[in-house]
Image: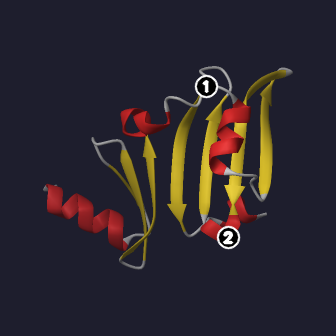
Amino acid sequence: MTLDEVVDHAVFSDGFLYCADELTYRARAGKVVRFAGHGPCLSNFAHLTSYEQFLAAFGEPGRVHTDETYGELVGYDTYYPGAQKYVRWDAWDHRVSLISLGALEESMES
């Protein structure tokens, strides 16, 4: 498949397009409805090294899911429904690891 065919397939099949620039796009019915940044593109948030600093910078989320594995804190999934924003705080690396903007998936809203 050509690159154009891959992009068309992702966009028109309600899929995801993962790009080398650490951006991911979510498409539905031929339109981008959500995008997310991860990796080095989040370097602007490197000064946030604690969850408390994160909350001070981003504000109180509408909903938080505490992610634990075998009793150990892995991170926080924070949801800001009014802004259609989801932010992942990585408790192991003490950093923002993902910011996603746009239409929230049904699984994220509940």
Horizontal arrangement in the rendering, residue 58 relative to residue 18 (left or right)? right
Q: Residues within 10 Å of mark 1 (few under 14, many from 20)?
A: some
Q: Quadrant of residue 63?
A: bottom right
Assess whether mark 1 and mark 2 are in contact (beta carbons under 8 angstroms): no
Earlier-in-chain disc, 2 versus 1: 1
Instruction: Pick the residue in front: 55 or 24.
Output: 55
- Left or right: where 5 falls relative to 45: left
Q: Is residue 70 above or below residue 34?
A: above
- Farthest residue in the right direction? 71
- Element carrying mark 1: loop
Task: Tell me the tag on residue 49.
Answer: 1
Where is residue 38 shown, x and y percent of the image?
44, 40
Quarter of the figure with residue 30: bottom left
Residue 4, placed above or below residue 68: below
Q: Tell me where residue 48 appears, x and y as whole percent.
A: 58, 31
Q: Which residue is mark 2?
A: 82
- Residue shown at 59% from the left, 21% from the top: 93
72 or 59: nearer the viewer: 59
Residue 18 image point, x, y percent: 35, 49
Closest to the observer: 1 or 91?
A: 91
Q: Secondary structure at mark 2?
A: helix
- Viewer-proximal residue among 51 and 28: 51
